[in-house]
Each structure stands twice: as C-alpha cells, then as structure tokens.
Image (tube, rainbow, N blue to C red):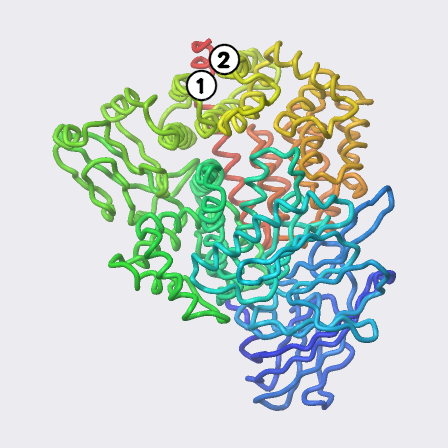
Amino acid sequence: MAVKRFYETFHPDHYDLFIDVNRAERSFSGTSTIHGEIKEETVLVHQKYMTISSVTVDGQAVPFTFSDDFEGIKIEAGKTGEATIKIAYSAPLTDTMMGIYPSYYQVDGVKKELIGTQFETTFAREAFPCVDEPEAKATFSLALKFDEHEGETVLANMPEDRVEDGVHYFKETVRMSSYLVAFAFGEMRSVTTHTKSGVLIGVYSTQAHQEKELTFSLDIAKRAIEFYEDFYQTPYPLPQSLQLALPDFSAGAMENWGLVTYREAYLLLDPDNTTLEMKKLVATVVTHELAHQWFGDLVTMEWWDNLWLNESFANMMEYLSVDHLEPNWHIWEMFQTSEAAAALTRDATDGVQSVHVEVNDPAEIDALFDGAIVYAKGSRMLVMVRSLLGDEALRKGLKYYFDQHKFGNAAGDDLWDALSTATDLNIGEIMHTWLDQPGYPVVNAFVEAGHLKLTQKQFFIGEGKEVGRKWEIPLNANFKAPKIMSDVEVDLGDYEELRAEAGHALRLNVGNNSHFIVKYDQTLMDDIMKEAKDLDPVSQLQLMQDLRLLAEGKQVSYADLVPVLELFKNSPSHLVIDALYTAAAQLRQFVEAGSAEEANLRAFYNDLSKDQVARLGWMPKAGESDEDIQMRPYILSASLYGKNEASEKQAHEIYVEYQDKLASLSADIRAYVLINEVENYGSSDLTDKLVALYQATSDPSFKMDLEAAIVKSKDEKELKKIISWFENAEIVKPQDLRGWFRGVLSNAKGEQLAWDWIRDEWAWMEKTVGGDMEFATFITVISKVFKTQKRYDEFDSFFTDKESDMLLNREIKMDRKVIASRVDLIASEKDAVNAAVKAAL
C-alpha cells in the first residue's frame, strides 16, 4: 500500500533555516520557517529524532504532535492556502554518518573533528523540519551558528553573505530538493580557482592533508564543469562548486548542489606517488558528482522510483567527460572492467531488482541503491542509447530536456521524450524492455540447415524461473544483420553467404556496449578462435567475459576457459590481462586451501604470469607505457598467488630496502610488497608496525595498501587481534569496517573468525552502521566468499529472521541464491576444472 506523501499536504517554496550547533554538548537547535501553500488543513512535515518545542502558522500557535515512528510532525493548521509555518526544535548530533554529524581525524597526534552533513536519501529530516521528498523543491536561506573558534572555515551550498553576532548567513539557493542541502565547518585547508565562465571551484580537506593532495581534483573539477557547460549547452547555475573531503563518510561521494562531499580516498591524492588506476578512480568520482549538478540537481527525479535516472546518467557521463579531459587514459576500458562486469554478474541472479523499481514506503528507498543495477546496469543502458543516437543527437535531446525541466522534477519517460526529439528511433519503447524488467538475455547464435539463426532467452546464474521475458536488443553485429532484435528467434539467412560477404568470423555485440552475452555454437566459436589473437582488446575481454558468465550459468564448462586463458597470457593489453585474471580468480572457488588442487592452480597462475613478470620486473621504469604500468599490479598479484620464488624473494628485498620509508615506495607495487611480507615473513611485530603506520598516515592510498596486507596474516592469533580492532574506531573507522571485514573473511585462516564476529556482534553493527544505506552490502560481502553447503545453512539460519528489515530483505534473498548456485556449481564442475588445470601444467 502506498504511504501518504507529505507533499500532498503542503507545497513549500522557501525555507529560512536557523541552526545552532553545540559540539561540546553533541546537540543542535534551531528554527525552520517554511513559506508555502497548505493543501490540506492537517499538514505533515518531516522530522526524525527531534524534540519539537513550538509550531506557529502565520504567527499563531497551533496544535501539533510528532513521532519518530512516522518520521513527522502532524500540524493542525486550521486553514489552506498560502502560509508561513515556523517550527522550533532541538536534536542530537549523530555518530552514524547521516544527518549532521562529526568526522574525526588527527593532526600531529591531536584528535580533532569536522562537522558535515549527509542528507540523501531521507536524512535532511534529522537536521531541520522539512518536506523531505524530492518533488518538494524550494529555495533555502541558511543561517548557521556554532561554538566557533579562530581559524575555522564554514561552507554551504551557496557563498557566505555576511556574519552578524557570530551567525553565518548564506546567500539564498536556487530551487532544489531538501536532500541536496549541505553545510560543514571546522579547520580546513583549501585550494581554489575559477572556470572560464567565472564559477568558483574549490577543493577542501582537513589540515591533516598537504595542499598538493588537493590540486589534482581541483584541475579535474574545473575542467569538468567547463566540459559539462559545453556538452549540456546549459550554464552551471550556481556561483560556486566546492568539493569537500570528509574524514568519515559512508558512501563514495554525494552531489550536494554547490558543496559536493567525498570520502577522502575519492578526492585527495599525492600527485607524486599515486597509481594511474587511483587517479582514474578519483577523476571518475569527481566527474560523476559534477554530472549530477545538472542531472539530479538542476533536474531531479520526481520520486525515488526514478533514482536510476540520476545515478545511471551520472555514471555514464563520468566516463564520457574523463574521456574528453584525459583521452590518453582510454577510460572507456575501465567501464568495461568495472561497470559492465558488475552489472552482468549481479543481473543474472533471479530476484534481482529492475533498474526502475516501484517505491511506496520510504523505508524501502535505501534498499534501492544496488550499485550493480542502478549505477552499472543503468549506465550500460545509457551507453546503449548513446551508441544508437550518436553524441550530436544526444546533446540536442539533453538540451531540450534541461530547457523543459530545469529547477523542476522529471521521470524516465521525460528523458526518452526529450531524446526522441533528436531521432527517428522510439527510444522509450526500446528502453522500457531494459529498465522495467530485471535480468538480461543470452543470445544463442547457431548454424542450422545452413542458416545462421539467433534466439534470445533470459540468462540465469543458479536457479531461475523462465517467465518469457524478451528484450529489444541492439545487436551491433560485424556483419549484415538487423540493428535491433525484437523477436525471440530470427533467421538471418545463408551462413556461408554472410560469412563470405563479411570476410571475417561473425560476432555480435561488437564493442560490448549492449547488455547481453552471446553463446556461439561450435562452428561459429571455432571460426572466432582462429582470429582470437588478432581481435581488439575489448573483443578479447568479451570472449573471456561471456565464457566466464556462461560457465557460471552452467551453459558451458569452466574447464573450457582454461585454454582460452593460456591463449591470452602474454597479451600487451592491461584490459585483456584484467579480464584474464578476473576469469582465473573464479577458478579458485573449485579448490580448498592447502590442497593438492590448490597447489596445481597456483602453478597454473605462475605459468600464466611468469613471462610477463620477467618482462615487466617489479620496479616501475621511467618511460614505460601506461599499458605496462596498469598491467603490473595484476601480474605481480598473480605471481605471488603462483608462489613464484623469484617474485617472493624480490618483493622481500624491496621491503627490506624501504622498511623505514614505506610511504615513499612506489604506489604501483606497494600493496604487493606488503602483502608478500605479511604472507611469507609475517610476525606480530610486523602487524603492529603496519597498523601503527595505518593509524598515523593521512594518505588514503597508503592506508588502503596497508589494510590489504594486514588482513592477509596466516596466524590465527594475529587475525584475532585484527578482529578486535573492528569495534575500535581509533583504528578501524566505521566507514572502513566493511573492507577490513571482507579482507579477513576472504582469508581462509580468518573466515571462521570473521563469520563468528559478525554473528556475535550484529546488534553492535546495527547500532553503528545500521542506519546507513551501505549496511546491506555487508551481506553481499559474505555471499561473495561462502561456497559450501555448511556455510549456506549457517547463512540461512542467521539471516532468515532479519528479512523483516526492508533494507536487508532483497539482499538476503538474493545472496541466499548466490551462495546456493555456487555450491551447486562447485559440486558439478570441480573435478572437470581441476583436471583441466592439471592438464595445462
């Protein structure tokens, strides 16, 4: 049943907010004065965890009640029409990384804090009474007071207007949704510049960071805003675009209009010692958030069922813009290894959400942020649209969209209508088959009675109920074929004629931009494999990707993949090597730690990597290609798993040389040197040394390398010590807990310890990170590791009674299937896979 939306009772058009934060008492108080139109005499305004002391309508006190159960205030306004509602309130500062909250950090051993905000999805109601729904757009005038001391900086969506009696007044915002309001204060470091059109660009951090760590993102942000103004043909509508790194931040980043907030690792980097991979990641996060300033902020989804509209679009635009800003990075290759791979794997499990999902109860909203679907699959849909339209038509359609809906709200069909103004294609009809249905098809391509035929059917990994779904599939064939496959089966005509006319092996989904996989029959596959070594890197990646997925879905054997991996092991393309080791990693599920089969698999890894590691060496070389720089981490990691003695010895020698200056060791190899040291030369002293460095450094990349190594300990005593840090925020911040937990759980020696911990400490987890939209991903992490019937039974037993939590319900049901399908796959494939690996040696 649909829950009543508060917007039905009251349409706000302007807020005057006064917020007074008292850090010492961990509380704040204020008044929310809202001008708007009362639609029903009983007005509903959102609040959560507040004490409401008074409510007036046009200056007259009126009866009201409030409760956290329905997250609102019921106000008996006694009238309809234009009115001003003034609400006085007080509330606690939270420690949940939602609402208004403190972030903790250290400078020279002194503990400090920065106050920041996070309001998406429904947390603005924890900061000020408001109609906290995307459609309820209004302008906001913020007045902010706090227990201020000298040297503090105050930021908000708009520039500061004036300071009077210790109150900071900010300029009035444009019309926007409540979840995009943001402010922050504390001691900060900053760098600023201006765009060609005069927009102030700034990057801000705590003073634990050096100025040089802010400059990379400043350059990306400036050029991204300039690119988007040109691409969208719509000016950036605010005077500023500030980027702020918060030391405690639950998600990756948040697109608050004019004041974007980030996890430190996704905004700050040391330009002198950061991997190219990390630079790409930071650049795509910044450009993703800045794409939102138009797509999400200027035009906002009407309701949360169209969340994908914000996220999928920004996810595509981050790649499109970085490709323009840094063409030498070939950033679309990263799209293939991250977005495409994530979407294809997740979307094959029966029960997965569709991109567009009905949402009635706000309690369901946080469960919608399934990154592999709303972000990755959604962006693949838009890449599909872009390849159908071309950039010129895309830009024309987008300009129309922004002109029609700016400062307002929109739904998916509004975008398709706008894009349809620039093309003859019925974009809406094509896209509805992809957005409103979960899953995707496998296209079977086969020669029958001399004719090439194609069929489409939903692809499942694990149990799946066939319900006759079909899709409008852009085929992207490298031969004469229809542009769109609408039917369940098509006959493309005489195979020999098509083959002769094409002059090469026939393939579908060239470029891997459409959301389907292909199963070729033996005739077609043999023909493709003859040319496999001459294919472009994306096509080689796609061969391994599709075979890996078909093997997961038990439509081919994983054993068939082994010779294909050998074929590409010496590829000069990092993209192909990434795909190769992504597929090879799946072979690990078929072996037990310490078994003879695992020894064979390690030897196979050594065989795959030994020529490349000999060619590349451990230490980066001056002037080497970007391909080699990006390939080295995959090769070193494979070489260490392969127990290559020369690699282990060299990594140890590098560690010894740099043991007193580990931060200066090249970030391209640092994680692998540290992992090797912990795995092969580990001790209690080493763990203590590395965790002390982890606590002391403010460099997020170095922190990640240290964490990656520490959790690899083979000593149960050390692993117990590591787990004891999980609830110590001085060592493991709640924002980083999932990564630490995943690291110990995936360690064969730590799996039982980590699983026991999360079951024993679930109540603590709910209290500490349970209010956070990322909470359900702890369950996802578990499902990626478990692979036995015993673990399935334990998972089922522990999580069944937690299905009543709307945030966790879908994830639990999905992950039960993920584990069950893996258990089944291993039982049926284990012998064949291990025999194939042994035969390859």
Q: As rendered, which of 612 and 374 lies closer to the eye?
A: 612
User: CB atoms at circles 2 and 1 under 8 Å apart?
Assistant: yes
Q: Is residue 616 above or below residue 376?
A: above
Q: Quadrant of residue 572?
A: top left
> Can residue 579 be spotted in the picture?
yes
Q: Residues within 10 Å of mark 1 (few under 14, many from 20)?
A: many
The answer for how far apart the CA atoms under marks 2 and 1 are is 9 Å
Q: Residue at x 46, y 44 (%)?
A: 323
Q: Quadrant of residue 426?
A: bottom left
> In the drawing, what numbered circle is on residue 611?
2
Q: Which residue is mark 1?
A: 569
Residue 175 pos. (x, y %): 56, 73
Q: Is residue 336 left or right of residue 457?
A: right
Find residue 528 and name its label. none
Residue 613, percent from left and from top: 54, 16
Task: Determine whether, in the image, residue 723 is placed left or right of residue 450.
Answer: right
